[in-house]
């Protein structure tokens, strides 16, 4: 039995190890958010955001397509405009397949792309970035660890079992930032109760995703989220750090839930 287990682990490789059961969401889920922008003394209503999940076909594979949009307006939009679209394809086992980000932030426009392929115990990721029309990089990185990007990591953390975790407990994730593989920790911050902008009160699980790497002078919270403490793990609040401030997204409406 032991030899069989070792054989299965070897033949499965990292591709099999990266499979995560999805119990939280399904195709048809759509969440809308009110956005708030915080920069220094400025704390203003910033616009609207969405997070949607649909079934998709990615190169012949059944997949989930997740799209997040962030669109600024009003005073915050006049100060610093944000029009971002993040798209993630993951297979039905939540393995990342493709991530793209089109970002118009302030006077800058960038396109980023990370495409994943799996073979045995190796993951190959082609990373591309175009900044204001200029090619910044087009490189391929390989790894033997499960790796997530800014959007596929949200699908992953919604399916973590937080039972028994105490504030400060963490889960390690390898994360790709641009073309660089870095260490990320999903840190459990405990539970609380908060009121969303749909008027409903939710008990939530609070987490932060912190990058720890020599390339960063400080620990960087790439993302913070408050997920409903139920089977759906709805992201009620999402905090995204931009180069000039924080975008705070608060749930306004939700439909198409799995449970």
Image (spheres, helix red, strand yellow):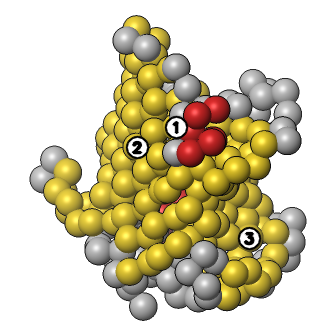
Tell me the mark number nearer the camera, choosing from 2 and 3. Answer: 2
The reply to whether residue 140 is visible in this rendering is no
- The residue under the point 52% across, 44% down is 72
Query: Where on the picture, by quarter, is residue 132?
Result: top left
Q: Residue at x 75, y 24 (%)?
A: 215
User: Residue 82: which disc?
Assistant: 1
Mark 2 residue crowding within 10 angstroms, few (<14) / some (14–19) / many (20+)? some
Which residue occupies the foreground of this view, 250 or 41?
A: 41
Looking at the image, is mark 3 or mark 1 earlier in the sequence? 1
Q: Position of residue 17 (x, y in %)?
A: 47, 60
Other residues around mark 3 within 10 Å, as few (<14) / some (14–19) / many (≥20): many
Q: Residue furthest top?
A: 134
How far across and how far down the image is residue 220, in percent?
77, 40
Residue that badge 3 annotates: 206
| Above or below, 208 relative to 127 | below
Could you tell whether 40 is left or right of 66 in the image?
Answer: right
Residue denoted by label 2: 85
Residue 6, position as x, y percentages in the image: 48, 63
x, y percentage for residue 119?
Answer: 32, 43
Disc 2 from disc 1: Cα separation: 10 Å
Within 10 angstroms of label 1, few (less than 14), some, or many (20 or more) residues? Answer: many
Q: Are marks 2 and 3 in contact (CB under 8 Å)?
A: no
Q: Nearer the viewer, mark 3 or mark 1?
A: 1
Tags 3 and 1 touching, CB below 8 Å = no
């Amino acid at each position: 039995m032991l030899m069989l287990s070792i054989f299965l682990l070897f033949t499965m490789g990292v591709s099999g190890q990266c499979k995560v059961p999805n119990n939280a969401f399904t195709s048809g889920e759509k969440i809308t958010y009110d956005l708030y922008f915080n920069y220094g003394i400025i704390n203003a209503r910033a616009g609207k955001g969405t997070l949607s999940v649909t079934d998709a076909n990615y190169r012949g594979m059944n997949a989930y397509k997740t799209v997040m949009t962030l669109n600024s307006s009003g005073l915050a939009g006049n100060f610093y405009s944000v029009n971002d679209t993040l798209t993630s394809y993951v297979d039905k086992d939540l393995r990342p397949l493709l991530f793209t980000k089109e970002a118009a932030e302030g006077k800058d426009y960038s396109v980023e792309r990370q495409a994943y392929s799996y073979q045995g115990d190796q993951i190959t990721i082609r990373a591309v970035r175009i900044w204001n029309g200029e090619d910044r990089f087009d490189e391929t990185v390989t790894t033997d660890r499960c790796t997530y990007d800014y959007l596929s990591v949200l699908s992953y953390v919604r399916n973590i079992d937080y039972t028994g975790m105490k504030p400060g407990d963490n889960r390690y994730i390898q994360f790709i930032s641009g073309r660089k593989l870095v260490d990320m920790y999903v840190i459990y911050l405990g539970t609380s109760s908060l009121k969303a902008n749909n008027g409903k009160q939710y008990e939530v699980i609070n987490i932060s995703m912190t990058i720890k790497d020599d390339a960063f002078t400080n620990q960087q919270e790439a993302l913070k989220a408050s997920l409903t403490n139920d089977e759906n793990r709805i992201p009620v609040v999402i905090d995204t750090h931009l180069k000039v401030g924080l975008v705070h997204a608060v749930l306004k409406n939700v439909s198409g839930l799995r449970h």
